[in-house]
Image (cartoon, rainbow, N blue to C red):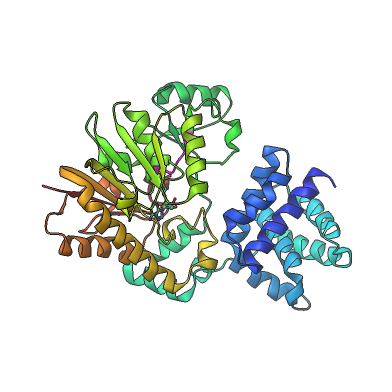
């Protein structure tokens, strides 16, 4: 099988797993991508799968209208391949090669007798274009309604931005290289990037590329991290030498950023998930940072805390991920209404369990990549109401909309992910 065909087969398998077997995007890509040797092929498969998932409702509606007979329950792989085909046209890949490889992939999937239909449908899409659909239709009804309640003015923009590809944001490791010098390295490599005006270490690339193509990636000069997430370090703004707890730290982006900025900080990076902790340790090794890393349940400090207070605590809490749908479109397939209640419980528990570990005068930042009020402003309001020694310290417009109980960045604004951040102080 040629590489071109193998990538389309891989994309169809991953999509079939996510769409029809309830697998997460991360797990599906994790199972598929290692089978491809070339990082460019892996990047292509990831881009096709993401594009197909973002536009899944629009593509499915079109296919259902165009197909002579509806596809059956057992045709999941064929539907997945058709979505992958439409995604490639949408992405602007050279149509002739994309179509030929996708039709050939139908044969490789033992769909020889349907290869002609795949060809005809994709040619029609190439000729006529795939009709537009309302971005809201990709969201489950209960979640779309909640977004409209929480963000009545911005909801339509949120749905639209969540259906668009995200830019690639980089964080330059200032421990080893300045942003301007790294920008020069990128330009030498023929890669176009923009320095962000409000984030000291951030660069933005409008088209994604495999990290291995980034100069000095393996040597730890740079990391991938969205602009919204990079702002958190400015909210925490720890003093030199501060003792810091990153309570939900894996895969380590924010802990690494803090360590890159100031080598006097004493950071404990904690996470409950052992696999993610190993990934975080690998990241710190790549970035050449020494950070105390632990696998433990932050909500149960008796099991890991040594009774010495922290000057700053970051709770980058597990959440609905509704702010990063453009990067994790499977959120819209797999999230259930009951998950939100459970997540809110976990978040409240983390806040209550960790507040006593904060030293007087200390700062706690509560952050999520959610856009739901229940996980964000309402969570902080409830915490302030039951915690007499907690004071809200407002942030500024760089952190997005002021909710009155923390700041909310909405997806796509300033090119960033949806992200919430509130700063609390202990007198
Ligand atoms: C949003 S992610 C953190 C991202 C990370 N801060 C970064 O910047 O790379 C949330 C993390 O919380 C972890 N987590 C969930 N419940 C936890 C708990 N009770 N104690 C510690 N970590 C927890 C999850 O395993 C997950 O890695």
Residue 341 as seen in the image, left or right of residue 72: left
Splitting the image into 4 quarters, where does residue 318 fall? bottom left
Q: Nearer the viewer, residue 137 or 383?
A: 383
* Residue 364 in sight in this render: yes
Task: Give how far across and how far down residue 80 sits, in percent.
Answer: 70, 63
Viewer-side residue, 294 vs 7: 294
Q: Quadrant of residue 254?
A: top left
Residue 1 percent location from the top left of the image? 85, 47
Residue at left 44%, top 21%?
Answer: 181
Is the residue 402 above or below the residue 113 in the image?
A: above
Q: Position of residue 41 (x, y in %)?
A: 70, 42
The residue located at (41%, 29%) in the rendering is 290
Q: In the image, is 50 to the left or to the right of 83?
A: left
Residue 398 in sight here: no
The magenta-colored residue range is 223-228
Q: What is the tally of numbered marks visible in this picture?
A: 0
x and y, in percent, of residue 78 in the image: 76, 66
In-image side of 308 versus 270 (left or right): left
Q: Residue furthest right?
A: 113
Whether 195 is drawn above or below 246: the answer is above
- The residue located at (15%, 48%) in the rendering is 426
Residue 44 belongs to magenta span:
no
């Amino acid at each position: 099988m040629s590489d071109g065909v193998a990538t389309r087969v891989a994309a169809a398998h991953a999509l079939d797993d996510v769409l029809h077997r309830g697998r997460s995007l991360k797990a599906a890509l994790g199972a598929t991508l290692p089978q491809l040797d070339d990082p460019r092929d892996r990047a292509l498969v990831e881009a096709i799968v993401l594009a197909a998932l973002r536009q899944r409702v629009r593509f499915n509606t079109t296919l259902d209208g165009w197909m002579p007979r509806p596809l059956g329950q057992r045709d999941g792989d064929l539907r997945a391949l058709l979505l992958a085909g439409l995604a490639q046209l949408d992405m602007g890949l050279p149509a002739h090669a994309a179509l030929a490889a996708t039709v050939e992939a139908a044969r490789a999937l033992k769909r020889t007798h349907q290869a002609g239909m795949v060809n005809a449908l994709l040619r029609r899409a190439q000729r006529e274009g795939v009709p537009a659909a309302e971005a809201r239709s990709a969201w489950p009804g209960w979640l779309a309604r909640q977004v409209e309640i929480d963000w009545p003015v911005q909801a339509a923009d949120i749905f639209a931005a969540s259906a668009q590809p995200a830019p690639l944001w980089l964080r330059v490791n200032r421990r080893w290289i300045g942003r301007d010098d790294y920008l020069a390295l990128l330009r030498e490599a023929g890669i176009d990037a923009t320095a962000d005006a409000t984030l000291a270490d951030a660069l933005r690339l409008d088209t994604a590329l495999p990290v291995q193509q980034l100069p000095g990636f393996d040597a730890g000069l740079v990391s991938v991290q969205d602009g919204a997430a990079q702002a958190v370090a400015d909210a925490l703004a720890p003093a030199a030498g501060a003792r810091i707890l990153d309570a939900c730290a894996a895969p380590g982006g924010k802990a690494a950023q803090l360590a890159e900025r100031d080598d006097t900080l004493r950071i404990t990076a904690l996470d409950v998930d052992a696999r993610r902790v190993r990934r975080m340790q690998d990241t710190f090794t790549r970035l050449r940072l020494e950070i105390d890393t632990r696998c433990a349940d932050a909500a149960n400090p008796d099991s890991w805390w040594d009774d010495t207070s922290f000057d700053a605590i970051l709770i980058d809490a597990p959440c609905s991920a509704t702010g990063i749908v453009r990067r994790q479109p499977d959120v819209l397939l797999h999230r259930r209404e009951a998950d939100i209640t459970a997540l809110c419980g976990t978040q409240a528990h983390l806040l209550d369990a960790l507040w006593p570990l904060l030293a007087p005068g200390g700062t706690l930042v509560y952050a999520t990549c959610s856009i739901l009020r229940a996980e964000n402003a309402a969570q902080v309001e409830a915490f302030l109401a039951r915690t007499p020694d907690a004071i809200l310290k407002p942030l500024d417009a760089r952190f997005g909309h002021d909710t009155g109980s923390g700041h909310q960045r909405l997806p796509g604004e300033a090119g960033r992910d949806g992200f919430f951040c509130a700063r609390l102080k202990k007198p």
